[in-house]
Amino acid sequence: MNVTCKDCERIFEDGTAEEWAALEAHAVACATCAEEIRAWKSLSVAAKELRNYSPTPELWSRIERALAEEDARKARRREGQGWFSFLPNISLGWQAVLAGAFVLILTASVVRIIRGPVDHPGKPDPLLKSAALKEVESAESAYEKAIDKLAAEAKPQLDTPATPLLANYHEKLLVLDSAIADLRAQAGLNPSNAQLRYQLLAMYQEKQRTLEEVLEAGK
Amino acid sequence: MGTMGLALPWKTKITSVLRKPAAVGRWETRVGPSDHLTGGPAQEGAEPANEDAALAAACRAGDLRAYERLYALHGARMKNLARNVLGSTADAEDAVQETFLKVQRSIAGFRGQSSFVTWTYRILINTCYDARRSRLRKKEVTTDEDSEQTPRMEPRAPGAHPSLRMALERALEKLTRHQRDVFLLYEVEGFRHAEIAGMLEITEAASKNTLFQAKKNLRDLLEPPRNGRAELR
């Protein structure tokens, strides 16, 4: 292979072994290229001056401590999150839905507290009377049974979720069940509170919708 | 700046060693790599891919011994690279520690598009530049008079040619960030262009070209002008 002085830079940039050998051979008879090669390689020799691999075992001790502390912090965060710990695992969309529902419930509760019990002629009483209460309870019970049937149908898909989406639905339903149990406990203590019943109904409706989506996703 | 012309061991006998890169086709010219392979930190190329994957898996599982192994294999080289970017041993140690923490925090998101070690070095380089920027911002806040934007290299253990090292450090600061990174990774740390491409998220050809430009600029900065070079241009 023949190389000339003009090939020097190209070979410096991306020469093959053969081209380098040819350039070195050319440099035997060409003082300019010999000087170029020498200067080029000398930069690599000089670079060694910037190399200092002296061991620093104390740095590892520092890093190890920092990693262990970070691990401990993570563990504390996980504990602190409690039943919200599933949140990073569910999709952003569902997190937004849950957050929206939470804000809605919170706003409704705050408005209810601020307004206080006001009697509006022609509007239903916020406190359920015994006859109305019985009706609500029986409707609730029937609704719950219907949802339980839906849940039974969706159970095989939720127990062994085949996709991340189904796993997210499963997590969401666990949250909804937890919230429903909580509201039911409160409603048990205060059965005439219509607001609690509305919230419970909203939770049931959300559960129904979710189960329908699970069944739809499994088709 | 003609320091290099005086200090460089120009008469040193240089053996050109051609090392086959990971990708078939081209050979990379390296000047005497064997001395830093023996006794120095392990080279990434020497690690089998399955060890890299095993290391990543163990780190993902939260095994502290895996992080210790990563440090044993690459800690010294990571610190040296950080030291050359940041100019201070204390800052370099902080950057290495921060890199390990970032690896721990984001290992769950590591999908293996590049090797685990390449990914770790990418984090280290970004951490170093974040530290440089943050230091620069602090400097701007504390004083408006000091317009120096490059890190002041603190003295370190003297090498064989301290004046050469200082001249090289000063010259490196005049290169672009990419030129400096590629020069440090290739010539100082001994990585291959394929590995550097992964670390800096550039192509292998861009890595080669950047190294070429870096060395050209370093020659201009360090060597007294000579007549012979003009003939080549």
Image (tube, coloured by chain):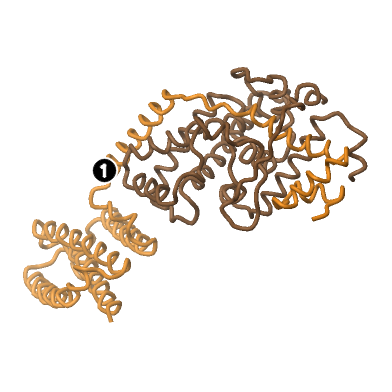
Chain colours: A orange, B brown
Horizontal relation, residue A93 to residue A175: left or right: right
Residue B93 image offset from top left, x and y in percent: 50, 28
Residue linked to disc 1: A80
Tell me what residue is drawn at x 9 percent, y 71 percent.
Answer: A137
Horizontal relation, residue A23 to residue B118: left or right: right
Tell me what residue is drawn at x 80 percent, y 32 percent.
Answer: B221
Image position of B177 with respect to B9: above or below: below
Image position of A19 with respect to B42: above or below: below
Residue A151 image offset from top left, x and y in percent: 17, 73
Is residue A178 or residue B63 the one in the foreground?
B63
Residue A144 image offset from top left, x and y in percent: 13, 73
Is residue A29 or residue B117 the one in the foreground?
A29
Number of other residues with Cα within 10 Å of mark 1, as a class: few under 14, some 14 to 19, many 20 or more: few
Q: Quadrant of residue B9?
A: top right
Residue sitting at the far bottom: A219
Question: Pointer 1 indicates a residue of which chain?
Answer: A
